[in-house]
Amino acid sequence: MPINCEFNLSRAAAIYYTGEQVSGSLTVTVHGKKHFASEGVSITLYGVSAVHWREPNCGPPEIEHNDSTGNLECAKEDYQGIEVHINQTKKLTSGLRLQPVFLSAMWNIC
């Protein structure tokens, strides 16, 4: 019995900033001819930001040999960071029993 979950966020681009409210709807459709029983429906919101950049770390020129004519390359230093902004599970409903005629349910997410 295939189950299809469709998330529809209120924004076209699923980009939210810290402190903003995430809203939308969740539609669960079960394809089958029998009753469908579930213990409940929960949704987990996980929001993370990640950055990475590289900067040259050039100090005074280092001379390896007095007769060196090659160009010395600057070392590069990497910087990176990851921050989890939200990792929260919300229970939308407890026990659920969908009838064979209507095998779809929808919840608003706020």
Image (spheres, rainbow, N blue to C red):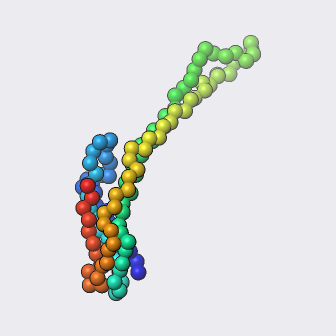
Q: In this rendered view, identify the residue nearer to me: 53 or 100.
A: 100
Q: Position of residue 76 (x, y in %)?
A: 57, 29
Picture quarter containing residue 65?
A: top right
Image point (27%, 58%), residue name? 109
Image point (45%, 38%), residue name? 51
Give the position of the C terminus as an image quadrant.
bottom left
Q: Is residue 5 visible?
A: no
Give the position of the N terminus as an image quadrant.
bottom left
Q: How many marks?
A: 0
Horizontally, is 102 left or right of 49 in the view?
left
Image point (26%, 48%), residue name? 21
Image point (43%, 44%), residue name? 84
Q: Position of residue 73 (x, y in %)?
A: 62, 25
Q: Is residue 25 visible?
A: yes
Where 27 sits versus 87, above or below? below
Q: In this rendered view, identify the residue nearer to me: 89 or 22.
A: 89
Horizontally, is 82 left or right of 5 in the view?
right
Q: In this rendered view, identify the residue nearer to me: 99 or 74.
A: 99
Q: Position of residue 4 (x, y in %)?
A: 36, 72
The residue lying furthest to the bottom in this view is: 33
Q: Position of residue 29 (x, y in %)?
A: 32, 74
Q: In this rendered view, identify the residue nearer to me: 64 or 15.
A: 15
The residue lying furthest to the top in this view is: 66
Where 105 sits versus 76, above or below? below
Horizontally, is 77 left or right of 92 in the view?
right
